[in-house]
Image (cartoon, coloured by chain):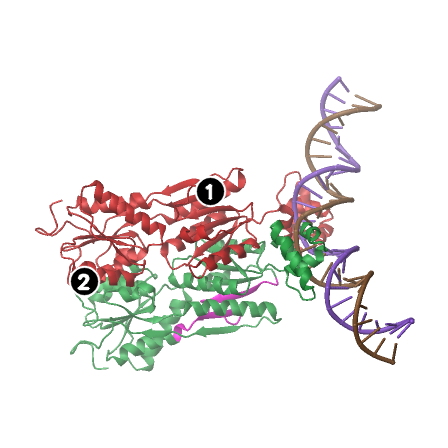
Chain colours: A red, B green, C purple, D brown
Amino acid sequence: MADVARLAGVSSQTVSRVSNGYAGVNEETRRQVLAAMKELGYRPNSAARALKRGEFRTIGVITFTLSTTGNVRTLEAIATSAAAEGYAVTLLPVAMPTQDEVRGAFSRLEELAVDAVIVIMEVHLLDAATVTLPPHVQVVVVDSDAGDRYTVVDTDQHSGSRIAVRHLLDLGHRTVWHLGGPEDSFAAQRRTDAWRSALEEAGRPVPPLVRGDWSAESGYRVGLELAAQQECTAVFAANDQMALGLLRALHERGRRVPEDVSVIGFDDIPEAGSFLPPLTTLHQDFAEVGRLCVEAVLRKMRQVGPERGTTLVPTRLVERASTAPPPVGGGGGG
Amino acid sequence: MADVARLAGVSSQTVSRVSNGYAGVNEETRRQVLAAMKELGYRPNSAARALKRGEFRTIGVITFTLSTTGNVRTLEAIATSAAAEGYAVTLLPVAMPTQDEVRGAFSRLEELAVDAVIVIMEVHLLDAATVTLPPHVQVVVVDSDAGDRYTVVDTDQHSGSRIAVRHLLDLGHRTVWHLGGPEDSFAAQRRTDAWRSALEEAGRPVPPLVRGDWSAESGYRVGLELAAQQECTAVFAANDQMALGLLRALHERGRRVPEDVSVIGFDDIPEAGSFLPPLTTLHQDFAEVGRLCVEAVLRKMRQVGPERGTTLVPTRLVERASTAPPPVGGGGGG
DNA sequence: CACCGCGATGTTTACGCAAACATCAGCCCT
DNA sequence: AGGGCTGATGTTTGCGTAAACATCGCGGTG
C-alpha cells in the first residue's frame, strides 16, 4: 500500500480511501491511485483488513454430509447469496454424526475466521454439543425445531407432507402408507408426524410405519415389505431416493405403479422425472431456503437482538405418473 | 491475549508459545496459561494470526454448479482432507458458466483470504479468463487437460471408458453406442474419445455419436433416438443420470434392458444400484480425487517449484443387472 | 571461582490496514 | 477582513499476534 501511495504521490490513507470506495476523494487523485494500484498489482490484504475492521466477511457453514441433495442445494444457494452480499462461505464438514465430530467442528470454528454460522444438520446432535461459540457469532439452523433457541429456516415439511397425503386420499385411496426417514432426523420426524395427523384428521386408519435411512437402497429393502402388503395401494416416501428404491421393490414383486400402487416422494430431485414411472413428488425450494438463511444471518449480524423464530418455505406438488386412483375393488372407497 | 498473560502471571509471548504448541515452555507454566485461557474464554484471533504469519490456512474451491454428484463428492473430500491438515475451505461458486462469472470469481478470489485454489470446472472457461492470480496462490485443477499449465488431478476417464467399452464387447456385442456428455466438458470429451478409440482398436464400427447435457432429462430425450435404432444392443452412457433417462426411454419404447439392450453408465452414483434394472457402471473414487487435490496443493505450497503434471485416479467396474450378452440373432457375433 | 552454555521467559517490533484526528486551502458570510 | 465552514488530504495510532532478539538463572567446566 505504501508503494502505491508513493507511486501515486499521495498518502497511504488516500489509497485506503480509494480502495474502499469512500467519497471525498478528488476524481483526479482517484484515477492516479487506481493507475498506481494496477501498475503495481496491488491487492488489499484481507487479513489486515479483517484485523482492523474486526470482521471477516465470511459465513461458516457446518454440514454433516453433502450426500443428500437438499443439503447440497441449500449450500449452493447459501454460497451464491453470500457472494452477492460480499461474503465468503467457509465449509466445515462433519465427517461422522457423532458428538465428538460435531464438537470438533465447532471448536475448529472457534479459531476460524467467520462472523456467523449456518448449521445444516440434524439438531439432535447440535443440542448435545454444548459448545460455547464465540459470543458475537450468530447462528442460523436448517432442519431443526429449536426455534426457541436459534433462528431456524426450513422447508415447510409439515404442510408439504399433508399435501402429499391429501393428494393420495383425494385420488380415492382409503389410506396412505408411509416410508419414513431415519429416527434421528427432525425433517423425517416432522414428515412422519404430518402424515399421521393428516390421516387421523381425515378419519383414516394409520398403517404401521416403516423406516429407511434416506438411501435408495434402504427404500428398496423396506419397499419389499410394503410390496407384500396387498392392501397397500398408496405410499408416501419421505424422500425421492427412497421412493426410487421402493419403485424397484414394487416392480420386482410385480406390483405395477401407478395401476396397483401409487407412490409419492419428497424433494423433487432432478432425476425424479426420469424414474420408472416418473415420480410425483413435493418440490422443495432449496434455493429459497439458502437465500433466507443468508438473509437471516446478515440481519442478525447487522441488528442487535438475537431475533429467534422460524421461517418456513412452502413446497409445491409436482404431479407425474406415479400416482393414480386406486385399483377398482382394491383399496378404494375412501 | 494480554489478559491471559496477566492472569497467568507471564508475558504475552509465553501465551503465544503455549497457544502454538511450541516446545521450551515449562510444564508448570503451560498449565497455568492453559487454565487462564480457559477461564477467560480466550480464542486466538485468526485475522491477526494470518496477518503475522502471512498465510491464511485456507484453500479456495472454485466450482461451477454443485448439481453434479462428482463435483459435490469431490468438494466434500477436499473439505475433509483439508480439515485434517488444519486448513479451512472457502467456497467460490460460479453461478453461470460465462466468462464474466468466472472472471468475477477469480477477482473476488483476489481479495479473499486463501493460500491456494482448487478449480473444479470445465477448463474451457478457465483458459479464457486470463486473470492474474496473486502470485503465491497455487492452483490445482480437476477435469482438465491443462496439465502443462496447471497441476491436474482427475479420474482416469480414458481408461474407465475403455473398460466400459471392453466390457460390452466382451459380452459379445458387435459394437457399442455412446450417449456422450456436453461438448464443452473435458471429461465428456475424454470419455467420448476413449470410446471411439477403443472401438477402432477392436476393429468395430463406430456408431454415430449422440450427446446429452449430463441430465437425466437429456438422457431420456436422446435415448428415444437410440431406442429407435434396432441394431443398437449396447450403450455406454457418459454418466449415470443420463443412463437413467436412457433406461426410461428404452422402457417406454418396449426395449428391454438387458435382454434387448445393455446399458452401462459412469460415476456409480449412490442411486445407480436402485435403477430399473440396477445399473452397471464405472465407479469413480471422488474421495481419492479430493484427497489428492489437497495433497497436491499443499505440496505445492510447501515446496518451491510449481510442479505441474497430471495425476489420474483409476475407476472400477461395478457389474449390475443392466448389461448382458446381446440377444441371439441380434447384434451379436463380435 | 569465573565463565560458558542452555533452557525458560520477557521485551520489542512489525505485519497491512483504516479509524480518528490533524492540517490546509479555498470559499462564503457578516 | 476575519471567522468559520467545507472538502481534500496527510499523520498518528493501534488492531492481536509471533518472530527476533534480549535477559536471566542455573549447572557444569576448566
The quarter of the picture where the C terminus of chain B appears is bottom left
**Looking at the picture, how far across and down is residue B20, in whole percent?**
64, 61
- Identify residue for label 2: A251
Residue A45 visible: no
Q: Given the image, on which type of amino acid does mark 1 rest?
A: Ala
| Nearer-N-terminus badge (2/1) | 2
Crowding near pointer 2: few (<14 within 10 Å), some, many (20+)? some
**Looking at the picture, how far across and down is residue B112, in whole percent?**
57, 54
Range shown magenta: B135-158
Describe the element under mark 2 as helix, strand or loop.
helix
- Identify residue for label 1: A296
Residue B242 visible: yes
Q: Is residue A154 above or below residue B215?
A: above
Q: Is residue A185 above or below residue B286?
A: above
Taking B130 as reference, is B289 left or right? left
Co-location on one chain, circles 2 and 1: yes
Q: Is residue B3 above or below residue B288?
A: above
User: Toward the viewer: A269 or B208?
Assistant: A269
Cβ atoms at labels 2 and 1 below 8 Å apart: no
Give the numbered dot on residue A39: none
Describe the element under mark 1 as helix, strand or loop.
helix
User: Toward the viewer: B140 or B26?
Assistant: B26
Taking B204 as reference, is A5 left or right? right
Taking C28 as reference, is A297 left or right? left
For residue B2: magenta?
A: no
